[in-house]
Amino acid sequence: MAKNKGTRIIITLRCTECKNIDFRSKKNEREKKKKKKIDYTTMKNRRNNPERLELKKFCPNCNSHTKQKEIK
């Protein structure tokens, strides 16, 4: 028998401020080395929070607390 997936799932959170930065561009090599995509992982309950989760967490690229949104 197949096991039920359950109500708790693992999700990934990404910064809304620096998510639009193109890490593949060749200009500003120094900036590219400093910036890294930092993702947070957490769990959420599908029954209580069916919509996308948004938390305020620290982003080392922005060097401040910013909104982190759930990504697919």
Image: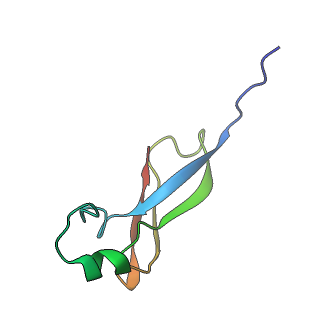
Q: Which of 45 and 20 is in front in this view?
A: 20
- Outermost residue, right side: 1
What colour scheme governs how the chains and residues are painted in the rendered image of this protein? rainbow
Q: Residue furthest top?
A: 1
Task: Please tell me whether residue 7 is drawn above or below residue 3 in the rendered image.
Answer: below
Give the quadrant of residue 62. Answer: bottom left
In this view, 24 is above or below 48: below
Q: Where is residue 4 in the image (x, y as percent from the top left)?
A: 74, 25
In this rendered view, identify the residue nearer to me: 48 or 55. 55
Q: Residue at x 67, y 37 (%)?
A: 7
> In this rendering, would 38 be left or right of 16?
right
Residue at image location 29% in from the left, 64% down from the top: 23
Viewer-nearest residue: 61 or 58 = 61
Name the foreground residue: 28 vs 49.
28
x%, y% of residue 12?
51, 54
Left or right? Give the position of 37 relative to 42.
Answer: left
55 relative to 53, above or below: below
Q: Which residue lies furthest to the left in this view?
A: 27
Residue drawn at (41%, 66%) of the image? 37
Which x, y percent locates residue 1?
A: 83, 13
Q: Residue at x 50, y 40 (%)?
A: 50
Q: Where is residue 43 in the image (x, y as percent from the top left)?
A: 63, 53
Labels in figure, total: 0
Looking at the rendering, in which quadrant would you find the C terminus?
Answer: top left
